[in-house]
Each structure stands twice: as C-alpha cells, then as structure tokens.
Image (cartoon, rainbow, N blue to C red):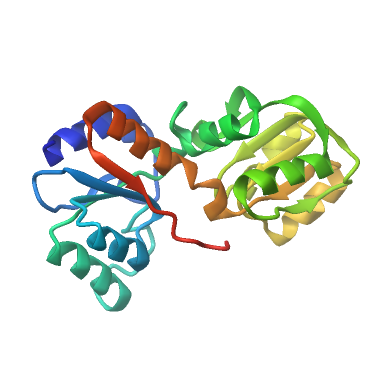
Amino acid sequence: MKRDELLNYLEGLLEPGKFRDYCPNGLQVEGRAEVRRLVAGVTASQALLDAAIACDADAILVHHGYFWKGEDGRVTGIRRRRLGALLAHDINLFAYHLPLDAHPELGNNAQLAQRLGWQPEGRFGEQDIAWHGRLEMPLDLAGLGARLAGELGREPLVVGDASRPVRRIAWCSGGAQGYFEQAIALGVDAYVSGEISEQTVHLARESGVAYLAAGHHATERYGAAALAGHLAARFGLDCRFIDVDNPV
C-alpha cells in the first residue's frame, strides 16, 4: 500500500490530535512511497533499525520514536547514526506514543488487560491514559505478582503485603508511577505500572495499596504487536513484531 494511505489510516485509528504529547506522533522520518513489509517494535533503537534493514522492511512502527521535548536537537552521534540508517535505506519511521497507550482495543493498557484477565471499568490520569477495573477472579498480592511474571516473562517489583486480597486494580503501562496517588483515591487494592520511584514505596506502605512495577518495556510490548497484527489482517501487509530485549 502507499505510505500516505497507511499514514492516513493510522491517523484515523489512533487519533493523535486528541493528545498533548511529548513527541510528534505519526510519520517521523519519510522513506519510500510504497510499503509492503513493516517491522514493529517498542523503541526505534539501532538494534531494531538493523533488524528492519535485515528484513528489507519498507517501514518501522514503534511506540518510542524520536524528537522528544527537551532533547538536544542536533543531529550528531547516536542520533546521526540512527537517522542515517533510515535515510540510507529509504525506510519510513512511524511512531505513536500516548495514542498507542490509550487506544481502547489495540493500546498497551487494553492489551495488558486482555492478557491478564482484568475487567476495565473506567479511565483516570492525564488524558485518561490510566485504567482501573477488577480481576476476573480475585487473587492475593503474591498470586497477582506471579501472574504478571508468567505473562510478561519477568518478576515484578512488588511493594505490599503478599497475603493482601486484590479485587480492584488500576494500571498504566510504562513510566506512570505519577498516577499512583490518583489510583489510591479510587479505592483500588493494587496499582500496576512499568516503573517505580523512591517516593512510590512510601506511598504504598502508608496507604496500604500495593504497587507492582512490572517493567517499562515489558508492559509496552503488546500495543505495537497488536497494531502490526491489525494492519496485516486489514491490508495484507507483511508485518512482523521484533522484540529487542530491554530489562527496564
């Protein structure tokens, strides 16, 4: 399909204009006009670019792209090598940050809920990025941690009483520890995010609400993969998700 046709579809599906984001969403680097093969991943790292080049990809689709607010905009060093690789091989780079967190079916938070058996009941946080709901079947905190470890392939950092029953839960993928106080106010038993800060531990201990840090990368693997699968089914594109391991 044509690059511009793909871009128009993604813009309509993910509606980036609704979000105040920290980076430009959409087509970040223009490549060839025709897209037959697309590689999806979490972050547009050099390792993902190299994998896409090896696959002879026409486009790369990621959650974490380039041109973040506050960054030094000079094209030197790592930035030069990354952009040089894309331009030399005429590869398009599409990136969707908050829109891919928030999408009600293909987004990171929706995909986490589907995989872990959480029943969404509402949204909260800045631009309604975070979700809250209930477990399909109540677990204690130790069981919830084990469930996360089994699904995500890594042990979460858990702050709280392991025997605490968990029925109501809130979650937000990535670096969303800043929403913890709002989750506490909702009356949930536990909050799951990707990262944790020093003060988060004290909030968990003093509120009695458990906090589980399951990994920024680990909690954001599923949106890009789901979107790639959707594009393959709808347009017949050759889409493949490549997971570049990241322990964070």
The residue most toward the bottom is 77
Kindly indicate the quadrant of the structure image that contains residue 80. bottom left
The x and y percentages for residue 159 are: 80, 51
Count of numbered circles in the view: 0
- Which residue lies at the image location 23% right of the left edge and 62% below the top edge? 53
The residue most toward the left is 33
222 in relation to 32, above or below: above
Kindly indicate the quadrant of the structure image that contains residue 45. bottom left
From the viewer's perspective, is 181 left or right of 15? right
From the viewer's perspective, is 122 left or right of 145? left
- Which residue lies at the image location 76% right of the left edge and 25% below the top edge? 137
Kindly tell me whether residue 129 is visible in this rendering: no
- Which residue lies at the image location 48% right of the left edge and 42% below the top edge? 222
- Which residue lies at the image location 29% right of the left edge and 70% below the top edge? 79
The x and y percentages for residue 84 are: 19, 69
The residue most toward the top is 121
From the viewer's perspective, is 80 left or right of 241? left
